[in-house]
Amino acid sequence: MIAGKILRLIAAGMILTALLMGLGCMHLKQVTPGPGPQELYQPQGGPEMARALAPALVIHGWDRPYNRIGRPKASRDAQGFEQIVMDPARPAMYWRAVPFSTAKGSYTAYIYRVHFPEIPVSLIPFFIGAGQNMGLFVVVIADQAGRPVLVATLGTCGCYTSLTPTSYTPAWAYPAGWQDKVVELYGETLPARLDYGRGERPRLVVEVRPGEHRVMGLGVLPAARLAEPRLYRGHPTPLLPADDLRRLPLESGTTSLFYEDGMLEGHVKGAWKPWETLFIGWWCLDGTVGMDKAYGVKGNPLYTSLQPWYRQSSDLNDLPGFLKFWGWRF
């Protein structure tokens, strides 16, 4: 009987959360680019393969600093306490390569992350993810030939996960019952497939919604098109090793973007999201829900489903398990 009541409470919480997220999805549903070129963050430097697969990001609302990609900057406040902010004047994209194997073959996940200064507080429309230092993951899974066979996008908290096949995805790898049509994800419309076969030096392009910083579009364009000044205003963005996030300059030493021990180990400093804790944390059994995370921290699953019973099986840190959870048969 008690278990039944708990399940009903969880169900009610999920319904309330869905309604709140639905209200948030109505925000800026129609984003109309202004006159002139769009703002484009272009990855620069890094190893050849990591650079070739790295996404370029189209940013809307660039006039607002909180919509710009930043680089973590550590300092101390007047009381001597450490603080970390994202500096939009110095953008950066961080990457790591994670090899993994399944029964079907060997793959490498190229995991890219960027961070923004904040999601601003907004009640109408309601931004449930309001908070500081939030980020986005773009995960490009390549086969042994280095071809991208799947693209995943999600917040660095694990939310709003999308998985999009490409023109290189083998037919046997699709989920059962796959329908080749656009994907609706909490108000965003994403393509059914990404075509890497058109144009020279194709580049994954991720379009980011202003304010909420959710992925609102995906595509692949040839490098020459992205270099056209009438279409895009390029912002060269250094491609840096993900390990650099654990050695940010601070006075005479370094510090980490993440808490390195204690109850918050593996979480991004300053990234607490109070609305998500209030409305979601109690029923998903996580008081730090929505708080952005490091990749690969043992004991801190980067879960991509809010349902607590899927916390381990949906963990992005376990790439074979993550793909299986979402139905992909690599």
Image (tube, helix red, strand yellow):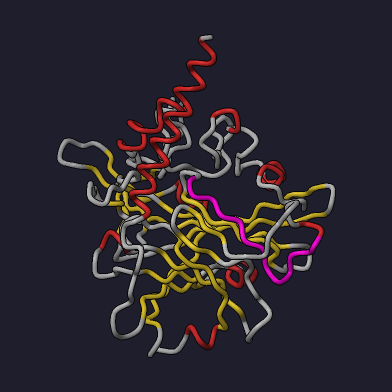
Q: Residue 244 location in percent, x, y?
A: 47, 52
Q: Is residue 307 left or right of residue 201?
A: left
Closer-to-camera residue (169/204): 169
Q: Can you tell which quarter of the image residue 47 is in? A: bottom right
At x 65%, y 36%, the residue is 313
- Can you say whether 230 is above or below 267 in the image? below
**What secondary structure prevails in the magenta region?**
loop
At x 48%, y 36%, the residue is 266
Magenta stretch holds residue 160: yes
Which contiguous range is marked in magenta? 159-171
At x 33%, y 44%, the residue is 128
Residue 95 shows up from this direction: no
Q: Is residue 305 left or right of residue 135?
A: right
Q: Residue 297 location in percent, x, y?
A: 56, 37
How many labels sit on residues? 0
Magenta stretch holds residue 166: yes
Q: Residue 130 location in percent, x, y?
A: 30, 46
Closer-to-camera residue (213/248): 213
At x 49%, y 18%, the residue is 6
Residue 264 shows up from this direction: yes
Q: Can you tell which quarter of the image residue 96 is in? A: bottom right
Closer-to-camera residue (95/227): 227
